[in-house]
Image (cartoon, rainbow, N blue to C red):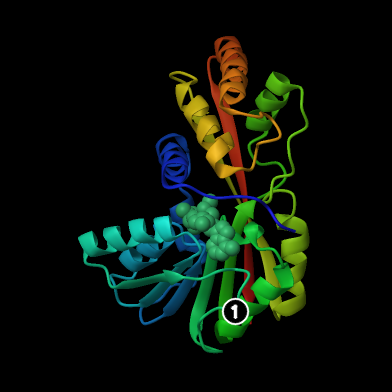
Amino acid sequence: MKFNYKETTNDLQTRIDIHTQYGKRNIDEWMLEVLPLSQGMKILDVGCGSGKQCFLFFDHLDGECEIVGGDVSVELLQDAVEVANEKEANIQFLPVNFNERFPFEDNSFDLVTCCFAIYYAEDMPFTIGEMHRVLKPGGRLFLSGPLPTNKQVFYEIITEATGKTIPPMPGSSRFSTEIMQTVESIFSEAEMLNFENPLVFDDSPEPFLDYTKASISEDRKLWNTLFDEKENFNEVMDKITRIAQARFERDGKLVMTKVVGGIYGKK
Ligand SMILES: C[S@@+](CC[C@H](N)C(=O)[O-])C[C@H]1O[C@@H](n2cnc3c(N)ncnc32)[C@H](O)[C@@H]1O
């Protein structure tokens, strides 16, 4: 499956900041609880974006580890390198594309992670096969992504505003099905973990609207069936704004719950 999709620094950062500020739970803490992190490990984070998880692991292990972050976006990798330089963090960032052979030897890593990104791979058995190949025997895989009940209020408001069917989302439409099944078929053990994080907007609907804009932004090319051009995008956002405001006034808040799955595999 091929999605015409591109992540951008601003849109990604806006969504990360809103999760951090309004989420009742912290996904980073959950990952640190469930992952088998220990000093001396060699870790690959693919689809690393601007390095969020690489820095999380690096700080947690006090830098006593070898971390490689890989992504297809040169822009996001540059951001990651800048932060690494500022922090004097010895993390290697390099181009890695899900759809091409990974530039690493067989059996090289103790842990391979891929957070909110695996669903952009075009050929799931190939990409998950590459993750398996570069893991050491007994090494662990961790993939995170949205489950079908993710962010219901967000989809409801967009459907009400546009009257259109939500385009199939690369993540929630196949994380618990196709992606989980592929891990089960390639890895010796696989299990699905669950994480729920309500984002509560009780001061104003504004952060919900910022989140929505950074999600359906035309730059990301995921939602373009909802609007044809920039003007139309603003019209759609105006309708979403009116509906979100009405719900906020009715309920005194908007609650958007992120429902995330963690697929945990053992080679
Ligand atoms: C939602 S972002 C997640 C980034 C990061 N893991 C985080 O949680 O902040 C999805 C990432 O997948 C990357 N991506 C999309 N297609 C890719 C591909 N073919 N190969 C490698 N990375 C890809 C994007 O560039 C983006 O950085």
Q: From this viewpoint, is residue 44 visible?
A: yes
Residue 220, given in percent of the width and then of the height, sits at 56, 43
Q: From this viewpoint, is residue 30 visible?
A: no
Q: Examine the rendered structure and indicate whether residue 42 appears above or below residue 211.
A: below
Q: Name the foreground residue: 190 vs 107.
A: 107
Q: What number of labels is visible?
A: 1
Q: Is residue 111 left or right of residue 99?
A: left
Q: Residue at x 65, y 37 (%)?
A: 223
Residue 224, given in percent of the width and then of the height, sits at 66, 36
Q: Quadrant of the C terminus?
A: bottom right
Q: Which residue is mark 1?
A: 101
Q: Quadrant of residue 126?
A: bottom right
Residue type, numbered disc 1? Arg
Residue 179, given in percent of the width and then of the height, sits at 72, 63
Q: Residue at x 73, y 35 (%)?
A: 166
Q: Examine the rendered structure and indicate whether residue 247 appears above or below residue 258.
A: above
Q: Examine the rendered structure and indicate whether residue 29 appears above or below residue 17.
A: below
* Circle 1: element type: loop
